[in-house]
Amino acid sequence: MQEVQLMVTCLCDAIYGEVAISTVQVLEKLGCKVHFPKNQTCCGQPPFNSGDWENSKLAANHCISEFQKQDLPVVVPSASCAAMVREGYKMMGLGSPLVIYELSEFIADKCQLDSVKTWKSYPHKVAFHQACHGRSIGLKDQQETLLRKVPNIQLVAFEQAEQCCGFGGAFCVTHGALSEGIGLEKLKNIKESGANEIVTGDMGCAVHLEGLIKKHQMNLRIRHFSEILAEVLI
Amino acid sequence: MRSASASKVTARERALKTLFCEPPQAQDTASAIKSYVLDHLRTLLIELEAQCLSNGIQVHWANNAEDANQIIVDLCKESAKPGDVIVKAKSMATEEIHLNHHLDEAGFETVETDLGEFVVQIDHDTPSHIVTPIIHKTRKEIAASFSREELGPYTEEPKELTMQARAHLRKKFREAKIGISGVNFAIASTGHLVLVENEGNNRFCTTAPDVHIALMGIEKVLPTPAELPLFLPLLAASATGQLLTTYVHFIKSPRQERETDGPKAIHLVILDNGRTNVLQGPFREILKCIRCGACLNVCPIYRQASGHAYGHVYSGPLGEVLAPALEGVESFGDLAKASTLCGACQEVCPVKIPIPELLLEIRHRANSPSTSEKLAWTSFAQASQHPLVWKFGLKLLPLAPMARHPFLTSWLKRRTLPTRVGRDFRGWWNERS
């Protein structure tokens, strides 16, 4: 049995608990034993991206020491946090102290999906939004490939699908109008595709898009792909 | 403008696939060649100078914008008098040093001959894109400008507008005493100046007047002509989605004795203007840039804001790095914050410049947060080191709006406050174990 440590991410810790729960459930269904280091907090990305590396290092060092207590790979349902640990730590001179996988990457590389015999149906029209930070860890189409395996899911194409959602961490508040404009453009394109659900792999995109959706009272919901997998894998 | 950018992105992909079996491999090779150039820049420039001199091209070195303007204005004064026409081909380097302003001050009639730059000039505007300078203008706006300048009867037909500009510019080419251009690639081993364009105006600028002055940044040099079969199509595809530009000029020498046309003198002005400093610093890789503009076309911020919002000659992701690199992170460091770090720019860059990493590096070095931002990150870092405080903080999140932090005010202006939906992870985990 593979043993892994879950990095829950601040956003799932604070808001999207269901995503973290689904992540654990999916990993367990795929035969993993999941550990949760309870003293974990944040990987340090928010101050890092804003240029405050001094404060980022404080958070990063805490993260490293908490996950180094066990010699197990870390799995995180966010390419953004994975990129921070893999690339950001290197830039700050902290080296590569942790082995970390984004969830879909871990499933593709380390798990046997075939071990799950039955998949439930998920008859929904879904727009898949690929989070941009996947680029920094070399993530290709692992998330979309997983979704395509789900019976009866209808993945719809939409205009400028590859474009960023406009979140960008602190960018979404320091450059609020730009961020909003980019986000609304994304939502407009998704609406026009006829999808009623957005599926993504990063809750950073989700928290921003969901805030816009609710403000503009659009009929769209956002889910993490782990939530769908947790529902359909029997 | 957004749809124009998007269609350029598609055209670029199509052209690259036609040209190269493995486009990423072409990008890697081009990037490696540019690394070689930066590593051997001094030697290559000396070689270029020697070759140019032996071909009859006079070479001038400009440390900064002031020097370059002085050199060019002095050269112009040698061959033209106030009121004479100077025709210009599109060149970002001349934009960088604000050359037109200096030529105007010296009393010359400077005429931009690239159609887009011509429109910018008659409108007293500035280019909003390094390749397509009037991407922000509509056909109607251009029609109005042309009719205001009495270039011909009012029309909104692109073809007729182009013909009006053409008729106007042809006269200027005939009158011009001097032609000024940029340089896309300068070949060290042969001394060729290579220029690409689609309108033919560069050819007029560099052949019709008696004097041709070319301005290039020091990083534009390539070792040998053998690099061109890679760089020419890569630039065309990345910039405009073409397999090759309509015109490619190889300029080697002024008019020879037996020849009946071409400029009698060619001057190459080689511009540093901060580049040597960049070469020795952490943003070195931005000097690989070949000014194709692909990063602008693909950038969500550029598409939303347009080029003028950047407040610098170089806009888009390239400008966010180049402006602070050339002019100091103190004055332009904030530009690096105008990015979501989505990485689309790095993906399309023909020379694989790691733009997001450079932006992070600039943000780090500029690190000039407002008091409220500093406070946010300090408290964040403190909480993140103390799990009890962290967990307590998470419980207080619904009270966040009371903090009245500018970040929150900005968030709430455009979005609703996120609220927990469903179960709390830590609670769920504790219950099951």
Image: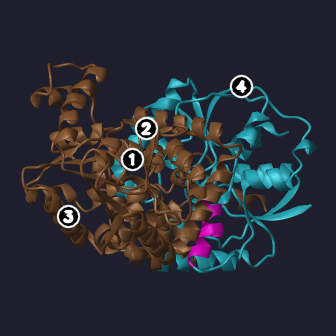
Point 28% across, 51% down: residue: B309
Question: Foreground residue, A135 or B429?
Answer: A135
Residue A120 visible from this viewpoint: yes
Q: Earlier in the sequence, mark 1 or mark 2?
A: 2
Q: Earlier in the sequence, mark 3 or mark 2?
A: 2
Instruction: Tell me whether the residue at label 4 lies in contact with that at label 1, contact meaning CB atoms closer than 8 angstroms.
Output: no
Instruction: Tell me whether the residue at label 4 lies in contact with that at label 2, contact meaning CB atoms closer than 8 angstroms.
Output: no
Label 2 crowd (10 A; few <14 / some 14-19 / many >=20): some
Label 1 crowd (10 A; few <14 / some 14-19 / many >=20): many
Q: Determine the residue located farthest toward the front in the rendered image.
A: B258
- Amino acid at dot 1: Tyr
Residue under label 2:
B5
Q: Quadrant of residue B29?
A: bottom right
* Chain that bears disc 3: B
Residue A164 visible from this viewpoint: no
Residue under label 3:
B75
* Chain that bears disc 1: B
Q: Which span is picked out in magenta?
A: A79-92
Decide whether the magenta segment is chiefly helix, strand or loop. helix
Indicate the chain coloured brown by its letter: B
Q: Colour of chain A?
A: cyan
- Amino acid at dot 2: Ser
Determine if marks 4 and 2 fall on one subunit: no
- The label nearer to you, 3 versus 2, is 3
- The label nearer to you, 4 versus 2, is 2
Determine if marks 4 and 3 fall on one subunit: no
- Amino acid at dot 3: Leu
Describe the element under mark 1 as helix, strand or loop: helix
What's the distance in space between the residues labelled 3 and 2, CA to CA?
Answer: 39 Å
- The label nearer to you, 4 versus 3, is 3
Residue A123 is tagged as 4
